[in-house]
Amino acid sequence: MKQKEIEHYVELLASNMALQANFAGFAGTSKKMLLVEGKTDQIFMKKVIREDVRCTTANGAFSNEQMRSMSQDEMSFHHKMVIMEVVYGLAVFPALIRTKGLEKLSLYGLVDRDFDPEEAHTNTKKLFITDTHDLETLMLSSDSGIFSRLEKCTVTEEQLHTAYFISYQLAYLRSAINQNVPKEFSTTPIRAGLYDMDYDRFVEEGRISVPRLILYMSEFRENGFSEQKTEPIIKKVLSAKTIKSKTDKDGTWKQSADGFHPGRIKDFFEIVNGHDILSVLRYYNPEAKEAYARCKSYAMNRQFETDLINTYDFSMFKTTELYRKMKAEEIVS
């Protein structure tokens, strides 16, 4: 993102904040603002931030007509990049950016690690990154008993193990598809935060069949590929270095669910996506499926995520690197 783009979003931020009824009072009493990617992040952070820190979502901070015309995938990526660039620009090159009245505001940002290397986010102390893949996995990794305390459904150890196993496979396969397959073949159909996925179409005994997964994805409007067109895609995915040794001659994941031990995988929670874990649980757990059926007024899994936040033992947040860095900047209590 270039200087002019940063200035454009700084101007949007200033304009949108000025339009909010309580901005005047906020500006007079506080100088710190924390920008987060989405509503779930905001719900979580509002439970831990200091009273003199304001937390707002990227959508609320930078909303404009251009963003409203974007797809969910584009929006998610765009929100993260805008937070990173604006926070970095204002923190590192303040003299080069026209601040549009925000010069007295100390702006901070929080983004998901996703698959980014940690060094991609360490250029300024004002930009925070989750220890793990996302906020959901941060909660799961720091509070291992969180699912056992949910009130709306009972999650067994076996169901959680299955969710971790399938999510682990999806993380590798999604990455291999993105890196080895033409961009026109979208991974959106297996973005659990957007779709209710039919896992039985490509999962058997916990193991994913790559050919069946690709065929499943090809049926969605985003792709619309014929079975003939999917053959070279299947071959490319199966020949990828990260996948070749993990699948058998039929293109099915070799490792069994019994042989899978997430505790032995050092970077497990950095690899897996929290949305995948919740999606698999909703699919294989009838109670969770009923309790967290998709509601049109909420994003996919939003109520499930909110219940996890309300169940989370926030004393465990203090064990994370994210808390340590936020504490040093006097963002959290």
Image (spheres, rainbow, N blue to C red):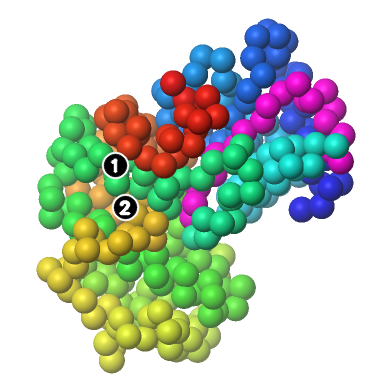
Q: Secondary structure at mark 1?
A: helix
The answer to whether 295 appears left or right of 66 in the picture is: left
Nearer to me, 202 or 67: 67
Residue highlighted by disc 2: 277
Q: Which residue is mark 1?
A: 142
Q: Quadrant of the C terminus?
A: top left
At a point 40% along the width and 50% down the height, the residue shown is 132
Q: Residue 76 lies in magenta, yes or no?
A: no
Identify the residue at image location x=35%, y=34%: 317
**Mark 1 or 2, nearer chain start:** 1
Identify the magenta region.
Answer: 96-114
Q: Nearer the viewer, residue 255 or 226?
A: 255
Is residue 300 or residue 139 the one in the foreground?
139
Depth check: give the residue in front, 266 or 257.
Answer: 266
Side of 10 where 135 appears, left or right: left
Of tags 1 and 2, the one toward the viewer is: 1
Give me the residue at 85% from left, 37% from top: 95
Indicate whether 260 appears above or below 14. below
Tag 2: amino acid: Ile
Q: CA distance from mark 1 to mark 2?
A: 15 Å
Asked if 316 appears above or below 247 in the picture, the reply is above
Q: What is the x, y in percent for residue 60?
A: 64, 30
In the image, what residue type sits under mark 1? Ser
Q: Secondary structure at mark 2?
A: helix
> Any magenta on residue 110?
yes
The total of numbered circles placed on residues is 2
State whether the magenta stretch is mostly helix, strand or loop. Answer: loop
Where is residue 64 shown, x and y percent of the image?
75, 36
Are the two marked residues, 1 and 2, in contact with CB atoms closer than 8 angstroms? no
